[in-house]
Amino acid sequence: MPPPASRLEARDFHLELTLNSGQIFHAMPAGRRWQVLDGKQLFEIEQRGECLLVARGGVEEARRFLALDHNLPEIYRTFPRDAYSREALEACRGMRILRQRPWECLATFLASPMKQVAHIRAISLALRERYGEAVRGSLVRAFPRPERLARLGEKALRACGLGFRAKNVLAAARRVAEGAADLEALRALPTDRLREALCEFPGVGRKIANCVLLFAYERLEVVPVDVWIGRIAARMRGRGGVADGLERFAVRRFGPCAGYVQQYLFHHARTTGKLPSR
DNA sequence: GACCAGGTGCCAG
DNA sequence: CTGGCACATGGT
């Protein structure tokens, strides 16, 4: 039996929303609680109002992974003031940008092109089930280490539903496993140089690199432009807008925590189908 | 059965 | 520099 739960104060936080907002893809409900893995570290957590009951995993580790140190009221003050952004904020209040591990984040988003969130989840779960290490008490296995995936063939990865993305996941696993890229060492680079380094992985373009920058390297000012953010930004820019790239526009428009804003707009648009008027 | 999904790389003009 | 297209898979 797990030890009794520790309490963790968590104002301005929405656990379920955060775990299912398209940052990670493996969170599992366990009764009233949620199970989520950070590497091989299992957290099992229930939210009761502004308090979290941490049934498994350390409180300090949970605080860090869930980014409870982000000052959300302060971040909200930087949000754009237009009606659509306010609507997204109200719909997603309490959602946080998690602190993911770079390898899991990179590999998972290499599986994402032209896939819906539900499909990415299915792929993540298949990879974990087949090639991940078991974690005591966890309904889901850990995300496979690069060394494990590097030993596989493309066919084995395709069998996890990866399709044409299999070759990119495999190449990334090999690059990391053989030390051609050190994802932890890259952390020290400034954002532009780090993005360039990430784009050296086959299959990583501007969008996926930005996802990894935002979700794994704490670059909260970065905006991944996917189909939804593209539509939203195009509407906000309107016809009178300059001949400016959508990403550049979004970065300026969304403000200093543009990545946060992006995540709220993305989730709101994806789950409701609503877009800004005009 | 089209159509679309948290894109990228490559090629023609 | 820009637009068009192939690339797999699964759900409406």
Image (spheres, coloured by chain):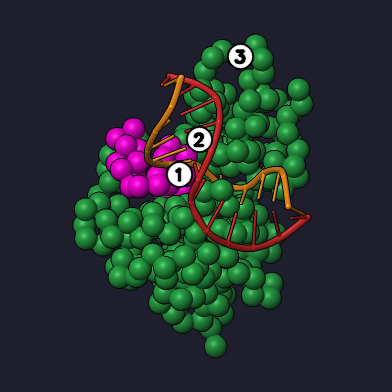
Chain colours: A green, B orange, C red
Residue at figure coordinates x 40%, y 45% from the top left:
A204
| Residue topped by disc 3 | A241
Per the model, the C-alpha gap separating discs 1 and 3 is 26 Å
Callout 3: helix, strand or loop? Answer: loop
Q: Is residue A252 left or right of residue A172?
A: right
Residue at figure coordinates x 76%, y 38% from the top left:
A274
Callout 2: helix, strand or loop? Answer: loop
Per the model, the C-alpha gap separating discs 1 and 2 is 10 Å
A256, A215: nearer the viewer: A215
Which corner quadrant holds the C terminus of chain A?
Answer: top right
The residue mark sitting in front, 1 or 2, is: 1
Q: Is residue A248 above or below residue A12?
A: above
Which tag, 3 or 2, sits closer to the chain's start? Answer: 2
Is residue A127 one of those drawn in magenta?
no
A72, A198: nearer the viewer: A198
Magenta stretch in the rendered image: A192-218
A27, A96: nearer the viewer: A27
Mark 1 belongs to chain: A
Q: Amino acid at mark 3?
A: Gly
Task: Kindly tell me whether residue A54 is visible in this rendering.
Answer: no
| Residue topped by disc 1 | A208
Q: Amino acid at mark 1?
A: Ile
Query: Label 3 neighbourhood size at 10 Å, few (<14), some (14-19), many (20+)?
Result: few
Mark 2 belongs to chain: A
Residue at figure coordinates x 64%, y 48% from the top left:
A94
Q: Are marks 3 and 2 on the same chain?
A: yes
Q: Is residue A163 left or right of residue A118?
A: left
